[in-house]
Every structure is written in C-alpha cells, then in structure tokens.
Image (cartoon, grey):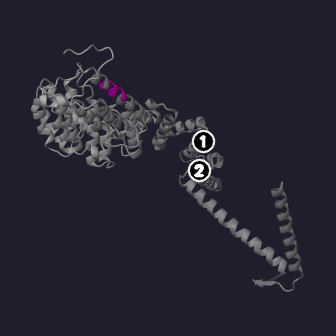
Amino acid sequence: MLWSLLKILVFVAIVGLLAMGAGVLMETSGGIQITAMGTEVTLSPLQSVIALGLLVLAVWLFFKLLNLLIATLKFLNGDETALSRYFDRSREKRGYQALADGLMALASGEGRTAMTMAHKAERLLNKPELTNLLVAQAAEMVGDTKKASETYKKLVTDQATRFVGVRGIMKQKLAEGDDETARKLAEKALALKPRHQETQDVLLKLQTKAQDWAGARSTLTAKLKSGALPRDVFKRRDAVLALSEAKGILDETASVEQQERAIEANRLSPDLVPAAAMAARAYIAKGKPRAATKILKKAWEAQPHPDLAHAFAEIVPDETAEERVKRFTALTRIHPEHLETRLILAELNIVAEDFPEARRALGDVVEKGADARAYTLMAAIERGEGASDAVVQGWLAKALNAPRGPQWVCDNCHDIQAEWAPVCPNCHSFDTLSWQTPKTPEIATATGVHMLPLIVGTLEDRSDMAEDAEIEDIPEPEIVDASMADQVPEEPETEDAGPKPA
C-alpha cells in the first residue's frame, strides 16, 4: 500500500516538474533559427526542446531499422534464426538478467528468490542447457526434491549436460541413503569424466563401504593416473585394499589367491602391521617359516606391535616356554628399549616362570606412567614370586584405573576399535585406523574406582584373619637350646593342683 502511494506521488511530482518546465520555456524569449536551402525556420525554446526529443527518437528508430535490415539480409543469406534473434533480443536480455539474479540469489542462500528467477529465466530464454541447472539447484534449496529430480533427469537426456544430471541424481541418492544406486551412478559419472576428483572420492568411499575391493583398487588407480593422489599414499591404500581382499586366509575355505593377496599387500606396504601379520600366516600355511620370520622382523623394525608378536609365536607353536624366549631374541633385539619389546619379554618370562627376569625386562616402565598391561604383568610377577594377595590386588587396582595403552584409533572420528579394519565402522572413512594412544581420556565408571579401596581393604582384613588363625593353630615349638630354658616363664599353679611329691 505504501509502495503504491509512493509511486503515485513520484508520478505526480514528475508531471508537475514537466509542466513547470514547459511554462518556463514558454515565457522565455529567444529561440533557435534554422536556415536551410533558402528556407528559414525559427523555433521557440519549447519547440526547440520538442524538436530535440523528436531528433533523438528518429535516430533511435534509424538504428533499429538498420539492425532489422541487417537481420533481413542475413536471413536471406541463409541464417534462419537471424530474424528471430532480432525480435527476441530484448527477451534474451531480460532472461539473462533473470539468470544472473537467480545465480546471485542461489549463492546468497535465498532459495525462494532463486526459484522465482529460475522460472523466469526458463520462460524467457528457452535454453534448458542454461536454466535447468539453476532450476534444479534452486529446487533443492527450497526442499522441492521432486522438482529437482525431474530437472536432473532432463539434464541427463542432453549429452552436453549428462554428467551434471548424473552427478545431481547421485547426490540425491546419497542424501536418501540409497548407497547402492548412488554407487552405480558414481560409476557412470566417472566413466563420463574419469579425471573428476570429487566423483573419484565418492565412488571410492561407496566401494569400500560395500566391500567392493576390486572396484576400489580400480578407482584408486584412476586417482593415481589423474594426479589426484601421491604415489606413496597410493601404495599404502592399495596395500590396504589388497589386504582387505585377503581377509579370511586362515579359514578352511581360504584360497591360494587370498594368500597371494596378503603377501602382495605386505610387498606394497611392509610397515602395515595387519598386512605383515597376515602375510606371515600365509607363509606359515605354505610351510615357509623363514619367509614369515623375515616379514615379521622387517615390520617389527618399522613398528613393534602385539599382532606381530602373536604371528611370530605361531611360527613354532609346539615349542617350550624357554625355547620361545630364546627364539624371540631375533625379534626383541631390534628395538630393545621399546615399550612393546619390554612387555613382550616380560610376558615370555612369566610363562617360563622366570619372574626375576620378567621384572628386569619391565625395568622402570611402571615408574614412568605405565598402562594397564604393565600393571597386570607386575601383578603376575608378584604372584609368581609369592607376594600376598594385598600386593597383587594393589597392582590389579592400578591396572583397572590406568590407561589402556595404544589401540586402533580412527584419525577422522577418534573412535577406538578393538581390531584393525580398512573402513572405520563408526564414520565409514577409508584407511584412517592407526595404532596410537587415544588422545581423549578413557571413561571409567566413577563408582568402580571408588569401590577399589573397600575391595582391597576387605581382602587385607581377610588375609590378616587367616594369618591369625594359622598362628593360633601352630603348636608351640620345643626348646632345643638348654640355655634358653630359664627364659621360659613358669606356668602358674592352679587351685586344684595336688601336693608336690617329696
């Protein structure tokens, strides 16, 4: 209402100013005198202004007619759209302006305005290859997924916009959670543009999530060829995929190809702990313990890990504890001061019942902020050396409240996993699990920690009571040394004692 009133007031003001100007010109003396070919024409000031306006209009009409003449000549010369372009020039101008306004509104997050401008541009331009994308994206912004899907399908029918249409439908399927259809669409989109990095990443993620390891290796190779992936990263991830293909080599139904893939994964990335352990087990299954030992030693040199030690123990499963301690020297001498080496040596010596050597293997680990595993080993050592239950329970209490130590942690979501996997089960990211100490503190129940002193205290009380009972049951020792007989107190006489013999 106010806007309409304002427009009326502006119109009245303009008309008033024009009338005032015409009055001033009519009262003004003088004018313009034109002489041409013996004819003299004198114009008043008002007539001069009108004549100037007519001259401008005549010039504008002249150029319009000239352009029409040029378009007609082009049409006669074989350009079938020359006349239509001439008459639609103003329409196109307004259409392109609407298209530009729609793009600006889309970039500004104004979905409704973008949708209005998109429909206006679509009506004025009649060029679907330009306006359909704006219509689809504007429809997505306002939540009209049906309209967006229909528009993307129109884009698919045109060879020039086919990739954009397939990519748009793929994103819609991803948003809907239809990963299988999205994966097929990503494969089509990548076939249209093999060097498109975003499509490569989406397809690789969907393939690893669906455990399509062969397809994922093909996509990874395409990323390497397009220059989107460094060669060292490619080797690492290709090893992870090869390792994923070799899962289950220890099953009875494991094939020779799976064993070969495990060995190939270790060849591609020797420092990948799961690949080394699996390749070693593959060689053990083939009866090649020397090759398994070589692989595990090389991987241990890169990073000592419990899985490597377990695989190393499987090379000779029927050896004695003392023989195992001696054989493990080939592994433990590589990084003798590493925490994992110390813990492995302590475990081996505990099994061999060499508890002093196990204590020496741990050294000062427990004094330097040990984890639960070290405290548990100390409890086993104390038990083996005959310490009381209170001492053993004290170490176990420390183990309960201590950090868990290095674990498989996702670099993306920081979720902790019990076993290594090529894809994080929590965030579904590929090749993000690494062996490290969690940065976030581990959560323990508050009541459990506070109850430990009560539990340990009860055990101490029971042990003291048991010791007292055992002391009371022990008979008095006979005095062997005669010199100490005088120090033994005489028993008091009782009232019913008889007379002493003479």
Q: Residues within 10 Å of mark 2 (few under 14, many from 20)?
A: many
The residue at which mark 2 appears reads as 106
> Is 466 covered by the magenta stretch?
yes
Residue pictured at 27% horizontal, 24% vertical: 471
Q: Quadrant of residue 444?
A: top left
Side of 393 where 153 appears, left or right: right
Which is nearer the N-term, disc 2 or disc 1? 2
Q: Amino acid at mark 1?
A: Ala
- The residue range painted magenta reads 461-467
**Gap in angstroms between the C-alphas marked 2 and 1:** 10 Å
Q: Residues within 10 Å of mark 1 (few under 14, many from 20)?
A: many
> Is 199 covered by the magenta stretch?
no
Decide which of 76, 426 is in the foreground and name it. Answer: 426
Decide which of 403, 293 is in the foreground and name it. Answer: 403
Residue pictured at 80% horizontal, 73% vertical: 50
Side of 228 where 474 appears, left or right: left
Q: Quadrant of residue 142?
A: top right
- In the image, is residue 4 above or below residue 465? below
Decide which of 51, 383 is in the foreground and name it. Answer: 383
The residue at which mark 1 appears reads as 139
Q: Which mark is residue 294?
A: none
Residue 422 visible: no
Q: Amino acid at mark 2?
A: Leu
- In the image, is residue 56 above or below residue 130? below
Residue 163 visible: yes
Quarter of the rendering occupied by the N terminus? bottom right
Report helix, strand or loop for mark 2. helix
